[in-house]
Amino acid sequence: MTESYFFSRTDLDRARVEGLVNDALKDADDGELYLEYAQSEAFVFDDNRLKTASFNVDQGFGLRAVCGESTGYAHASELSEAALKRAGSAVQAVKSGKGGALADGPARTNARLYPDENPLGDMDFEAKTRLLADINDYARSKDPRVRQVSASLSGEWSAVEIVRPGGEVIRDFRPLVRLNVSVTAGDGGRQESGSHGAGGREGYGRFIAADAWQAQVDEALRQALVNLEAEAAPAGEMEVVLGPGWTGVLLHEAVGHGLEGDFNRKKTSAFADRIGERVAAPGVTVVDDGTIEGRRGSLTVDDEGTPTSRTVLIEDGVLKGYLQDRLNARLMGARATGNGRRESFAHQPMPRMTNTFMLAGEHDPEEILRTVKDGIYAVNFSGGQVDITSGKFVFNCTEAYRVRDGKVGAPLKNVALIGDGPTVLTRVSMIGNDFALDPGIGVCGKGGQGVPVGVGQPTIKIDRLTVGGAAA
């Protein structure tokens, strides 16, 4: 298993490593040795030719000692006993300071959320480049207005071993793949783009099937052609309907980060000290679930070795809990939820989301749209900004429509949604029965680290939200 990556190729001896970890962390409240071996590849086909083809191998360790609120962390790309000894001396600089007792995390299971096999060997180099060329040719053949096509294929595979004092060892093998297509269409002097991506913790097979990638191209082209017809967006406070799936990124940014343990322990979140209070409209239930098979944000165990879990954050509008890593759970007297995540061995873990979504309601999406007197129907987002302390956000829509008297009308361009997460949740008046997760493209940034995540939600109606655009 992981022996071939961390021990048989190095001078590390398992028994001696466990002894060094015990010595380095003997006076600490918590800590671990995180060993990682990772392979990654990326191919980009753009402007009718292959522009990028890369393959990388990264390996190393991170050793962490936690004392009270203080953390000592040392990492190295050199897997050797000498490097580990130097790291042990460095992390012992933090002083012992007992800060609460660590509660147990979720129970361990033998559930397999994704295969162990490395997806990078699914196809040879020629097959991968030919796939991207086929995508390019298919997209350009679909419509004479297509002016540019960009397609990318990326894959990762990592072997992880986490060693704790006392000899506890946790292992995981993590595949991750993604296929993205972007199409630019033009009419006269105007150009607009559309994109679609899909991925997950599995091999390439499902995504490189002809019907799958052709559907991605068709969707990217559809968005581009819709945007060619888009009109200037109105501005002002109005009713907003969010479509299902990827629009859950607004929930992730505007609400999810504010429910992470570190912000609430430090009381810098708008949700701090509000457990048991109503923070959203009745019917709003928000869940973070790292246990969904094959999903981009899922993990068998988090990056501290805690099993991931299904954590109900908001239930029927009432705040139930936060997302916890081991450090913040210990200091808050809470239970670790399996949300301690890091970008790589060179980074410290912190509480992060996995797959975060709002559960379905009972309304038909068409019924929801029929109730809109004058508003916006937002189907796709590109990105946005959020302030964790206040929850204030600005999101840009890549596909949106004007709705008048219950009828979906012209597409709109340059639509921005402006508000704050805590307020938006209280203004949700209708929740659809069409729950969907995103297609597997999310990346979350926090503290300079990026990790793969998932989002989702059904169609929802927000009674009042500020729309930024042209003057109405």
Image (tube, rainbow, N blue to C red):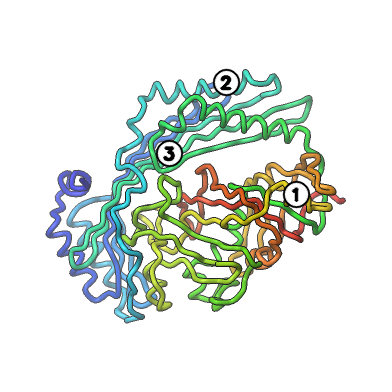
**First of labels 3, 1 by sequence position:** 3
Side of 127 where 210 appears, left or right? right
Q: Amino acid at mark 3?
A: Val
Q: Name the residue at 32% across, 81% down.
A: 98
- Looking at the rendering, which quadrant does residue 418 occupy? bottom right
**First of labels 1, 2 by sequence position:** 2
Q: Amino acid at mark 1?
A: Leu
Which tag is nearer the camera, tag 1 or tag 2?
A: 1
Q: Residue tagged by mark 1?
A: 369
Cα distance in 3D space between marks 3 and 1: 35 Å
Q: Is residue 333 above or below residue 383?
A: below
Which tag is nearer the camera, tag 3 or tag 1?
A: 1
Residue 61 seen in the figure: no
Q: Secondary structure at mark 2?
A: helix
Q: Amino acid at mark 2?
A: Tyr
Q: Residue tagged by mark 2?
A: 138
Residue 21 seen in the figure: yes
Q: Residue tagged by mark 3?
A: 177
Q: Name the residue at 63% across, 26% down.
A: 148
How crowded is the residue under tag 2: few (<14 C-alpha within 10 Å), some, or many (20+)?
Answer: some
Q: Looking at the figure, which quarter contains the N terminus? A: top left
Which sits in the foreground, 18 or 142?
142
Q: Position of residue 50 (x, y in %)?
A: 49, 24
Q: Name the residue at 52% across, 43% down.
A: 441
